[in-house]
Image (spheres, rainbow, N blue to C red):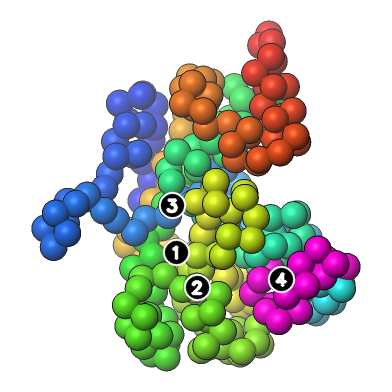
Amino acid sequence: MIHEVEISTMNDLFEMISEQEYREDLGRHRNLFIYRGEPDASFTLSTSLRRHCKDKSRILEPPLLLNFTKYAILQEPTLQDSVWNQMILGQHHGLPTRLLDWSFSPIIALHFATTENDLEMMDAHDAVVWRIDIHELHAMLPEKYRACIRKYNTTVFSVNMIREVCNSLKQYDEDMQDNCMVIIEPPSLDPRIVNQYSFFSVIPDKMVDITGFLDRCTDLTCRFVIKKELRWRIRDMLDHQNITERIVYPGLDGLSHWLGRHYFVRD
């Protein structure tokens, strides 16, 4: 079941970003929630591959990755060795993939929920931050995947781990059907991956309705709906805390985007 929480005050927001529970075994406040911010609360969870290729995703995914690797190999010679790295690097450079971006940081998710290509739309609609739980999702995995997690005494998959149990996307789709998904912590192929504290859910081909799966199969998934009246207030707070495009997208593109928004004049 997906729970929905309305964020209409800064106190509501503080509860969202500080919801780590106390773990007596560690003596620390920890959880395994990951977050995804969307600028419009009406958006559904969907991969860029599904949005671009629709019902032809299964047919078009292999040539997409093949051609990306063929041209990108000049910059990253090891890409041909791992379809998982191909998707991860491609995702961060705008390639349509089956990966869905998440962050371990709710603050990073808030950044994506409180910015727009057209800043005049900031007051036009509510935004949303999604939260899912890695433990809950990985408990649903087939035994060979759960055995791999136990073997490495970890809670999230690396690229090498998933390669150990699954040698192709075809095998992955057969293993997952539409009943489960793997969460990957990517290698540091790009500074953006590091700065965004990135994680990815690898969506099986048969899982067309991601929201429906989470509603049907999970208990800890939550949608934090950020009221439109609060978006600029949160945006200004994040800028003050240095959570900006300058950090999230290192380089001149991010710097220029941040400065453009910093000097934007509201009507």
- Which circle's residue, 2 or 1, is located before the other in the chain? 2
Q: Which residue is drawn at 32% across and 77% down?
A: 153
Compared to residue 214, the image places residue 175 above or below, namely: below
For the residues carrying marks 4 and 1, which lies nearer the camera in this image?
4
Which residue is at a point 69% across and 14% down the rendered structure image? 263
Q: What's the amino acid at mark 4?
A: Gln
- 75 vs 241, left or right, is right
Identify residue for label 3: 104
Q: Is residue 138 left or right of residue 29?
A: right
- The amino acid at mark 2 is Ser
**3 or 1: mark nearer the eye:** 3
Q: Which of the 4 image quarters holds residue 48?
A: bottom right
Q: What stretch is highlighted in magenta?
A: 71-87
Q: Is residue 50 something one can see in this rendering?
A: no
Instruction: Check disc 1 and report its element: helix, strand or loop.
Output: helix
| Disc with the residue nearer the chain's start (4 vs 3) | 4
Please name the residue that numbered disc 1 is placed on. Answer: 214
**C-alpha distance separating marks 4 and 3:** 22 Å
Q: Nearer the viewer, mark 2 or mark 1?
A: 2
Q: How far apart are marks 4 and 2 (CA)?
A: 14 Å
Instruction: Tell me which corner region of the image, top left, top right, bottom left or bottom right, holds residue 27.
Output: bottom left
Q: Where is residue 173 in the image (x, y as percent from the top left)?
A: 60, 84
Q: Is 81 contained in the magenta span?
A: yes
- The residue under the point 35% across, 73% down is 154
Query: Mark 4 vs mark 1: which is more N-terminal?
Result: 4
Give residue 19's mark: none
Dot 4 crowding, Cα within 10 Å, few <14, some 14–19, many 20+: many
Residue 162 lies in the magenta-colored region: no
Q: Tell me if label 4 and label 3 are in contact, CB under 8 Å.
A: no
Q: Residues within 10 Å of mark 3 (few under 14, many from 20)?
A: some
Secondary structure of the magenta portion, mostly? Answer: helix
